[in-house]
Each structure stands twice: as structure tokens, then as C-alpha cells.
């Protein structure tokens, strides 16, 4: 039987759906973390040596670990009351660990690897064990999660202490696959089976707001990149034009995200047959969109700092790949909410792919302008499609 104190950790029907000030404070750590991720890519792309695919993969692994920390925390505060001292302790402890991870990011695959891995494992296992004892009703899920996290902790920590970077990459790839695979599968165990969390109460409006807020702070990070890069350069016409294109691109990304599906996300989660499962599925579509925005921010720096320079293939794929990744995630997001994908999203992805051969010898400013043009086309198509609609759309997620 659950005690009164433990029952008090659960959100009740009258709890506020708004994010608490502590959660917004928590997000500030991830603003810093995202700047470290984008700066890590920018440093590599601006170096004289040839960029290897493995280096981009390293940054991806670091980003995936940080995203898992954030999304698990948001799921916890959407099920348990973030105004309770025990849950606030979990959030603050996670916040500190995430800050350590963010500080370690620039050398996360080098001399600070064990710091990054150690902080990650401590957060994941530490808060799971804490909630296991603080909230008895969650122990069934806690046992399964703890076992899976214990399994992934081995390659995380081994990868942190080995000297060979390639071996570290293999071990951390195994670790991240275990973490994401376990979450997708419901952390199944022999005899016990998988965790049944589909009926777990969840504050749908709160979780939707958290996803929206994280996407906005990612856009905020891209604005930070735009401002810092432009303020550190001369206000020449080419750089000023690149600055304007970058700002316009951020506005277009905001517009495309919130058109229909972005606004209806709270209603989509609360009216879903299985709100908990539907809310978790949002994590993956937002993962693609946020990764796309981070990559787009890297493209901003390249186009503002070198507007008329030589566009290397890596720069080209970065400037066009960021918006493409965002549109791919946005297409998945739209399907999750409406069980369909608008032709403008598919058309935008095709247009970005078709632009690649023709832009190989175009300077970064031209490539950025082309990417902004594609996003503008998507936004205009959305506006035209909605102009004649008299009845607002309602979420119809796939069954």
C-alpha cells in the first residue's frame, strides 16, 4: 500500500500544468550544453584538417546522452509533482550533473571522457535509485530501469577510461543503444517482462509545454550563435546579409514548428488513448528537430564568418542538412499528431536534396539563402493551406 507521503509525490488532477520556475532554471543548463555542442562542431569545421565522419559521430553521441537526461527529467516531472521537495532534489541533482557533462563536452571524447561518462551514469542511476526508495509505487518500473542502466553503465565507464578513441566510440555507441533501446522497448527483463507504463497518469499539457520550451531554447541558442558571430566581425555588406538570412531562417523554423501541430501538441497528448506512450514518442520527433536546429546554427556561424568563402562539401551538407533534419523531424511530428504528412514538408526535403549538386561551388551565403528560401516556401504553403479553412484542425493520431 502506498503511503500518504509517497502518494503526495504524484501529480493530482488539480496540479498546475505549467512548468515550474525550477524547471525553467533547469533548462538554462541545456542552453549552455547546446552552445558547447555547436561550438564543438564549429571548431572542427573551421580547422584546417579534413573533417572525419567519426568526429561528427562523437558529437552526436554526446548530444544523444544530454537529450536523454533532459527528456527523462521532463517525463519524471510530468508524472510526479515538481513542487514536492523530493522531486525538486532530483531536478537540482540532475541539473548539477548535466552542468558537469556540458562543461566536459568540448573534450568529451578526450581527456574529459571519464568526467562526461561518470556524470551521465551518476545522474541516470542515482535518480532512479532515489525514486525507487522515495516513491514505492514506481518500484516495478524502477527495477527494470535500474537493470538496464546498470548494463549500459559498463560500456559508458569502460569507454571513459580506455585510451583508444575508436574503442571509446564503439563502447559508447553500444551504451547509447542500450539506453535508447531499453526506453523504446519498455526495459524488458526475463520473467518480469516489460514495464507497463501506458496507463501511468501523465500531465499531458505540462509535457507538451516542456517539449515546446526546449525547442524554443534551442532556437535561443541559435540566436546566440548568430549574435556572437556577427558582433565579432565587421559589419560588411556580405556579413550583414548573412546575418539577416540567418535570423530569417530562425524565424521560419519557429513558424514551421508551431503551425498547427506545434500549437495542438498539448491537446494531442491529453486526448491520446495512451498519453504516456504518446508523450514518449514525441521525444524522438523533437530529437530530430532539435538536432537539425543545432546543425543549422553551425551553418549560421559558417555563413556569417565566411559569407563569400569556399564552400567545402562538409559545409554544404551542414548548411542544408540542418534544415533537412528539422523538416524530417517535423514531418514525423505531424504524422504523430495528425496521422498524415503535408506535401510541403516532403517537397521541402526533396528541394534541399536537389539543391546539393548545384550549390557545390556557391559561397556559404548563397547556400544559406537557398536553404532559407526552401523553408520560406514551406511556411508559405502552410499559410495558403490554412487560409481557406473555417474549422480548426483537431489531433487525430495514428491508432
Image (cartoon, rainbow, N blue to C red):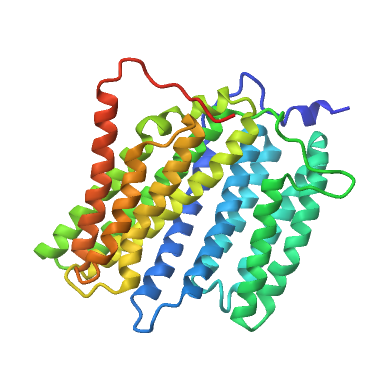
Q: Is residue 41 left or right of residue 382?
A: right
- Rendered location of residue 306, percent (x, y): 22, 70
Residue occupying image coordinates x 22% and y 75%: 310
Nearer to the camera, 377 or 20 = 377
- 203 is higher (above) or lower (below) than 98: above
Nearer to the camera, 258 or 84 = 258
Nearer to the camera, 47 or 227 = 47
- 219 is higher (above) or lower (below) than 160: above
- Rendered location of residue 79, percent (x, y): 66, 33
- Rendered location of residue 97, percent (x, y): 62, 57
Residue occupying image coordinates x 71% and y 46%: 185
Q: Which image quadrant: the N terminus?
A: top right
Q: Quadrant of residue 206?
A: top right
Residue occupying image coordinates x 42% and y 60%: 35
- 212 is higher (above) or lower (below) than 302: above
Q: Is residue 76 left or right of residue 136?
A: left
Amino acid at each position: 500500500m502506498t503511503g500518504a507521503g509517497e502518494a503526495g509525490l504524484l501529480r493530482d488532477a488539480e496540479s498546475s500544468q505549467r512548468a515550474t520556475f525550477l524547471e525553467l532554471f533547469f533548462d538554462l543548463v541545456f542552453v549552455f550544453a547546446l552552445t558547447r555542442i555547436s561550438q564543438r562542431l564549429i571548431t572542427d569545421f573551421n580547422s584546417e584538417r579534413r573533417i572525419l565522419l567519426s568526429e561528427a559521430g562523437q558529437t552526436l553521441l554526446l548530444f544523444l546522452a544530454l537529450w536523454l537526461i533532459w527528456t527523462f527529467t521532463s517525463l519524471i516531472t510530468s508524472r510526479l509533482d515538481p513542487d514536492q521537495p523530493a522531486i525538486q532534489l532530483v531536478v537540482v541533482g540532475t541539473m548539477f550533473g548535466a552542468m558537469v557533462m556540458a562543461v566536459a563536452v568540448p573534450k568529451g571524447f578526450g581527456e574529459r571522457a571519464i568526467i562526461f561518462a561518470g556524470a551521465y551514469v551518476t545522474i541516470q542511476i542515482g535518480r532512479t535509485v532515489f525514486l525507487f526508495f522515495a516513491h514505492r509505487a514506481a518500484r516495478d518500473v524502477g527495477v527494470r530501469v535500474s537493470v538496464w542502466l546498470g548494463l549500459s553503465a559498463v560500456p559508458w565507464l569502460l569507454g571513459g577510461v580506455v585510451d583508444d578513441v575508436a574503442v571509446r566510440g564503439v563502447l559508447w555507441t553500444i551504451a547509447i543503444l542500450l539506453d535508447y533501446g531499453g526506453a523504446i522497448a519498455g526495459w524488458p527483463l526475463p520473467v518480469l517482462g516489460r514495464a507497463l507504463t501506458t496507463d501511468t497518469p501523465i500531465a499531458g499539457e505540462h509535457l507538451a509545454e516542456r517539449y515546446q520550451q526546449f525547442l524554443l531554447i534551442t532556437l535561443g541558442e541559435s540566436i546566440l550563435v548568430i549574435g556572437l558571430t556577427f558582433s565579432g566581425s565587421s559589419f560588411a555588406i556580405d556579413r550583414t546579409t548573412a546575418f539577416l538570412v540567418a535570423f530569417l531562417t530562425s524565424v521560419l523554423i519557429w513558424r514551421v514548428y508551431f503551425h498547427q501541430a506545434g500549437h495542438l501538441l498539448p491537446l494531442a497528448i491529453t486526448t491520446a488513448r495512451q498519453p504516456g506512450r504518446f508523450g514518449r514518442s514525441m521525444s524522438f520527433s523533437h530529437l530530430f528537430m532539435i538536432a537539425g536546429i543545432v546543425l543549422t546554427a553551425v551553418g549560421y556561424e559558417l555563413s556569417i564568418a565566411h559569407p563569400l568563402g569556399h564552400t567545402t562539401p562538409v559545409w554544404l551538407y551542414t548548411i542544408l542538412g540542418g534544415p533537412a533534419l528539422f523538416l524530417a523531424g517535423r514531418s514525423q511530428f505531424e504524422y504523430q499528431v495528425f496521422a498524415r504528412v503535408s506535401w510541403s514538408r516532403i517537397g521541402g526535403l526533396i528541394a534541399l536534396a536537389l539543391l546539393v549538386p548545384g550549390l557545390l561551388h556557391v559561397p556559404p551565403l548563397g547556400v544559406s539563402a537557398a536553404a532559407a528560401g526552401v523553408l520560406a516556401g514551406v511556411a508559405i504553403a502552410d499559410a495558403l493551406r490554412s487560409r481557406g479553412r473555417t474549422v480548426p484542425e483537431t489531433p487525430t493520431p495514428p491508432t
